[in-house]
Image: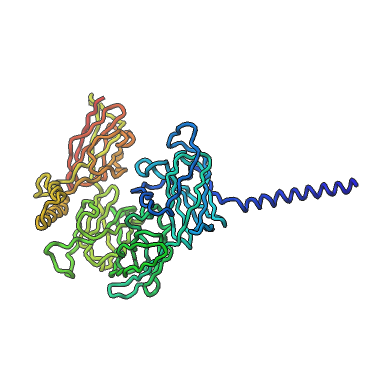
Amino acid sequence: MQKHSALVAVGALILLAALGVVVPQMLAGDATPIVRWDAAAELDVPQEPADPQAAANGDGALLLERTEAPLPDAPARSDERVDLLLRGRVVDKFRGPVAQATVWLDFGRAGPRGGNNRQRRVPDPVTTDADGRFAFQGQTFRDLRVSLQVAHARYAPSVFDKDVGAVAAELDLGELTLLAGGQIRGRVTDLDGNGIGAAELRLQPENDNPMRWLRDREKLVAPFQTDAAGYYVREHVTAGSWALTAVAKAHTEGRSPTFVVEEEYQVDVDDIRLGPGYEVTGYVRNGKGEPIAKADVTMQSEARPRGGAAPGAPAASPRVTENAPWQRGNNGGGREHSTQTDAQGRFQLAHLPGAPMRLDVRAEGYLDLRLDGVDAKLGQPLQLVVQDGLRIDGRVVDGDGKAVTLYAVRAIRTRGLQPAGVAPGEAEALVAQLRSGSLDEPTRQQVTARLEAIRSQGGTFGGRGGRGGPGGQNDNGGDGNNGRFGFASDLGKPEQHADGAFTVAGLQEGVYEVHVQSPEHTRQRSAEVELRLGAAAPKVDLSLDA
């Protein structure tokens, strides 16, 4: 009897041990998938231009219903953090579960977006289980706004954005509904109507499409390609206004007209026609022949000269302009093509038109370079040399003439050089005339032509400044066209300067003020000094008051 009881006891222990293994596994299998994150791992989301919620109000499927949550006992600071379990369920329009959907979470403080209300991103997404459930767990703001992006191969991507207000320990978002979306189809051709295979297409949201303000849009709206005959069909496109951009090897880039996609409808998009495209490669080096990495290189079609040569006429020889004004998109030409040089100073720009191009190079610490009349059809590598930037030397003393050795210094560019034959304030007056909107067409063309002539001579507005250290290195591009006083931090951290001497280097041509801030003295700025290529570096001495 005792032996039998012992066997029963041993069997019971074995059964309990087995249940201890099997039952947790069964429970774990039914658990909601959870992504847990730490606040230190969060990513800062770049500021959005507008609140997409306003664009989504017309379609309940794109918004979350406000979730009721218990209010805290006392008013909390908007930046107070709270441990939160945020859960939800992804379903289709029939409320059936959507498994294997990918969900990303961004969150911020409650209230409108923009300004200081920056979004935070949970680095890892979560995948829904067989019942469509998902959850995130971590520290959020007590007054909360959430933005979830959901993607699935058989549904249109969706954005769910809502200011949920005050939250406690747990927040149930309810059901997030995915829709099938619409279908688009069309063709990419050359100018003769021949289909272009393997052309890459990208959907670009337009107008009030909520996808327009989405960060990392390609994780939801991936690019796709045409077939060998240039045709494409794209399923599950989110309802809204869209345009398509197309790019193919040896062709210029193209864009479709804006079209509207409706749920479960098909849209035939107009053919996208691409012209012949060319490629320009080259190298950017300094005067010693050393490669310059991370130099900005931009090419843009030149505006056709008024009354100039007929279309198809050969372009003039390229002209190099040192210290070119950096004026993005403000010269009447075509769209810009931009890139940066690699560690060897090499750059490559593709899909360029056959028209004469203007090339601009901007590298920190060097004079801007402009090359006019570049013919991309030649296919020859460009060897570009940029000159060292200009400098201002000086010395800082106190009221007794003793050297001040600890201070921050910065040269701030107030305006460009006055071009020869241009009256003071003429460029500003011309701009004011254009903005008035009261000019007839012939006068408007004359004013525009004169303004372009002034700009081509280097008569620019604003520019780049520099921050100088004791060794004469320019460690920052500075604030263009900033001639105002600010806080001491605007000039950077005070540094030691032997015998009070400084050099601010890497500057462009123009008119500058030198600003100095010492912890023991009042902030001071110099009289204006002019920097001109070929002229000696100006010397600026500043006396600081206690």
**Figure label count:** 0
On the image, which quarter does residue 275 sit in?
bottom left
Q: Give residue 387's position: percent from left, percent from top.
A: 24, 51
Q: Residue at x 16, y 46 (%)?
A: 417
Q: Nearer the viewer, residue 133 or 245?
A: 133
Report the side of 261 relative to 5 (left or right). left
Report the side of 148 relative to 393 (left or right). right
Q: Nearer the viewer, residue 198 or 220?
A: 220
Q: Give residue 236's position: percent from left, percent from top.
A: 43, 63
Check the image and report above or below for 102 versus 535.
below
Q: Residue at x 14, y 69 (%)?
A: 310
Identity of the residue furthest to the right in this view: 1
Q: Nearer the viewer, residue 25 or 130?
A: 130
Q: Give residue 393's position: percent from left, percent from top.
A: 23, 38
Q: Give residue 227's position: percent from left, percent from top.
A: 40, 72
Check the image and report above or below for 315 versus 78.
below
Check the image and report above or below for 393 versus 205.
above
Q: Nearer the viewer, residue 34 or 350?
A: 34
On the image, which quarter does residue 99 sit in?
bottom right
Report the side of 170 relative to 233 (left or right). right
Q: The C terminus is located in which quarter? A: top left
Report the side of 261 relative to 396 (left or right). right
